[in-house]
Image: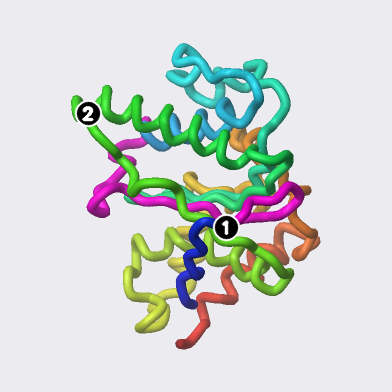
Amino acid sequence: MCYPVVMRRIILAPGEIYHIYNRGVEKRKIFLKEADYKRFLALLYVCNGTKSAHLATQGTSLEKVGNVERGEPLVDIAAYCLMPNHFHLIVKEKDTGGISRFMQKLTTGYTMYFNTRTDRTGALLQGTYKAAHAKDDRYLKYLISYVHLNPVKLIEPKWKENKIKNKKRAKQFLDEYQHSSYPDYSGRKRVENCILNTAALPDYFGTPRNFKASVTEWLSYEV
């Protein structure tokens, strides 16, 4: 499985789906503890709206911001995965400028939080977010699997090059990993469901069981 090609300065068009990602400066960790992941998830929800995201609500968890009046969503968040030093989003542009506005609110809000909590200054992420256009069904379906399989690297960093050593362990790890939308697509009901609009994606899988089978089939991939 290869890393998606970076497409710089692409035109973000309404109705189109994009892979958005970024990592910490100097590959530093941007999530140091559970509270950091929770803050970012809360921001994914709060910042996805036409109304201003206030620090008072940014400081709370998803359980507490679910009823915040955000205005109209700026984007459809179709999938996500948070890793210790980077994040992935699959989003659909709703109106012109929606992705740019959402990402500015999201990254600014999280950087302010992280810098305050860790008593640091300066940039946290590697410049402007990266974007790749998911322009056809084959690539988009692959991308959904790619994003959701990222956590496997935490237990087997070289699994793509050296093949997976323990598929059962990898599947269980994905089931238990809480910082991605994998549990949501697997049919689990949880507060994080409010972040997503899974209807923004074509229904490639039909059932949670088919989704899991399709994603984990890549664990047998050979380069």
Q: Looking at the picture, tell me which residue is in the foreground, 65 or 137.
A: 137
- x 22%, y 28%: residue: 118
* Res. 40 visible in picture: yes
Give the image location of residue 148, x and y in percent: 54, 59
In the displayed structure, does residue 173 sit left or right of residue 214? left
- Count neighbours of disc 2 (C-alpha within 10 A) and say few if under 14, some if 14 to 19, many if 20 or more: few
Q: Amino acid at mark 2?
A: Thr
Please check the rendered image and state whether residue 132 is part of the magenta-colored stretch, yes or no. no
- Give me the disc on residue 176: none
Q: Amino acid at mark 1?
A: Ile
For image coordinates 49% across by 34% down, the residue present is 104
Residue 20 part of the magenta segment: yes
Q: Which residue is mark 1?
A: 10
Q: Nearer the viewer, residue 26 or 148?
A: 26
The disc at residue 118 is: 2
Alpha carbon distance from label 2 to label 1: 34 Å
Q: Residue furthest bottom?
A: 223
Callout 1 secondary element:
loop
Give the answer, above or below, for where 64 lies relative to 2.
Answer: above
In which quadrant of the rendered view does residue 93 lie?
A: top right
